[in-house]
Image (spheres, rainbow, N blue to C red):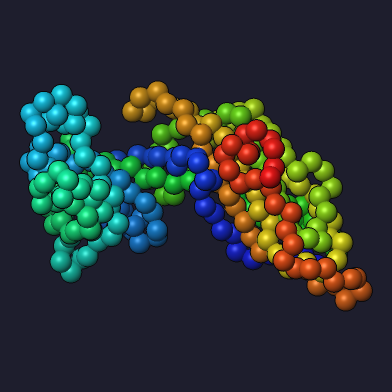
Amino acid sequence: MLLTGDVRLRALPGGALLGGFYYDPYPPRFAANLKEALAGGAHVLIRLHPGVRYPMSDAELLGCVDLEGHVVAVVGYDDERGTFELADPWDIERFGGHDGGLRSVPEIELGLRWVNSTYDKAMFVFPLYVGLAATVLSEDTAIIEATIGLQPPAPQVRCAAVGLQHLHAMISTPSGVTLLGDREQHLAALNSDDQHCFRWPIRVDYRVQGEIRVAVASVAHGNDPYPFSDVVGTVASMDVVHESPTTMVAPMDVVREASTTVEGILSGSPR
């Protein structure tokens, strides 16, 4: 019988990440939920007012930068010191100032410097959701299922994309596994509230110990904070093992590779 391990997800090389907004007008609750999300591994971006701590000319400040703010990543927190930990991309050596790199900011100060001065809106970034699973039908057959959706990392987060278009999914399997159908599958469109499951029937021909991998690419589109469309994608993988004393043993390190780049998925040409 086919045995599977934990599913691993990573962004598809060359593809963008999805974004989602989290808003809460009550700062203590916002901070508590933000900390819970960070502890769970969420990736969070916020915008800071650039005019006070980041030196720049009046033309830059008033003409373009201050309309958007300076983006930093929130990477952690310290309750004992009452701080959030930031990863700030500002290059101090090149542009001057004192804020840049990894640093701590008191919660109260961060609330004052947060764009909109409300301390209650952040953006979460995350890859396209791909849920990978195997349904075992018999000793030597199974169905590999990849469920696709615009699923944010936390229930409070609202995904900025409203739908997906031109979904392409491609599977690669280890030696000893035979696909009983097409390697590539397609879907024209998917709404933000829906999910779609791609399915690949497989047959196990002999002993297997390797990895099944599904690469998915699509075009996400939305209107917040402005109309956009971006190529997004995810590679989902899981280890598989099948032991059969009555069948021959094949090399376990031979994998039939499908392309896991955006260009390869969208063009339908595995390498």
Residue extending farthest right: 246
* Residue drawn where x is 38% and y is 54% of the image: 42
Quadrant assignment for the N terminus:
bottom right
Residue extending farthest bottom: 245
Horizontal placement of 6 versus 186: left or right?
left
Horizontal placement of 113 versus 162: left or right?
left
Image position, residue 130 (x, y; %): 58, 47
State the residue in front, 106 or 16. Answer: 16
Tally the numbered discs.
0
Image position, residue 203 (x, y; %): 84, 56
Asked if residue 112 can be seen in this view, the reply is: no
With respect to residue 73, does 158 lie above or below? above
Asked if residue 153 can be seen in this view, the reply is: yes
* Residue drawn where x is 57% and y is 39% of the image: 262
Quadrant of residue 71 in the image?
Answer: top left
Image position, residue 6 (x, y; %): 60, 64
Residue extending farthest front: 94
Horizontal placement of 60 versus 147: left or right?
left
* Residue drawn where x is 10% and y is 36% of the image: 56
With respect to residue 233, does 228 lie above or below? above
With respect to residue 96, does 220 lie above or below? above
* Residue drawn where x is 53% and y is 31% of the image: 219
Image position, residue 204 (x, y; %): 83, 60
Quadrant assignment for the C terminus:
top right
State the residue in front, 1 or 99. Answer: 99
State the residue in front, 142 or 245. Answer: 245
